[in-house]
Image (tube, helix red, strand yellow):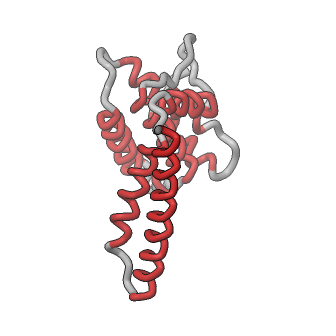
Amino acid sequence: MDYSFVVVANAAVAMQKKGVSLWANMAGFVGTFVASQETKPHVDDVKDMLLDEELTYGKANPKAPVLKTVVAYRTSKSVALKAVEVGVSLLDDKGKPKGKTQVEQEVKAMLNEGVKTPLDKFRGTMTTANSLGDKLLTEMEYLSALQLVKELNEKLLAGYAIAKKEAA
């Protein structure tokens, strides 16, 4: 099958009317592009290529909906780019597009290889909480946040005391 961006875009537009396989066309187009490169392209290069194709398609088809407004297109593009980013092939051994669920599972497996520890997750949460602290507006919001921090502090101190006893 010939995988071109026009086929992808037409599938995105047609999907609004009936169940055309947008994913298969997106995976085939991006997967074929990646496979055709001498070296594995960076995900930003693939994003740029897709943006160029979107702009070209939009100019050639001014009456078609803007692709970024088609949810199924955005979803397919996002999954394809995430696969490229983590190194998951969009094509099977025979050069046919893999199913979207299969690609999503392979991406998830690749990402889970670097599973975060509870401390890593806690650090991320604290970073988010720290940035949100600057967005509090009222005295009541600050008092509520301070109460949450107090409760967290008490819980951490209690956990530390238990861990210290168990280590002794």
Within the image, what quadrant is residue 24 found in?
A: top right
Write the residue at 50% across / 45% down.
165
Q: Could you say where residue 46 lies in the image, as x and y percent from the top left?
A: 35, 34
Q: How many marks?
A: 0
Q: Is residue 106 above or below residue 48?
A: above
Which of the two residues, 115 or 97, is positioned nearer the viewer here? 115
Can residue 29 be seen in this snapshot? Answer: no
Q: Residue furthest top?
A: 94
Q: Could you say where residue 31 lies in the image, as x and y percent from the top left?
A: 46, 25
Write the residue at 47% across / 38% down.
167
Q: Residue furthest bottom?
A: 139
Can residue 54 be seen in this snapshot? Answer: yes
Which of the two residues, 154 or 102, is positioned nearer the viewer here? 154
Write the residue at 60% across / 33% down.
100
Which of the two residues, 138 or 155, is positioned nearer the viewer here? 155
Q: Could you say where residue 157 lies in the image, as x and y percent from the top left?
A: 45, 58
Within the image, what quadrant is residue 102 found in?
A: top right
Write the residue at 34% across / 64% down.
130
Within the image, what quadrant is residue 86 found in?
A: top left
Quadrant of the rendering where the N terminus is positioned: top right
Q: Could you say where residue 155 lies in the image, as x and y percent from the top left?
A: 51, 60
Q: Residue furthest right?
A: 18
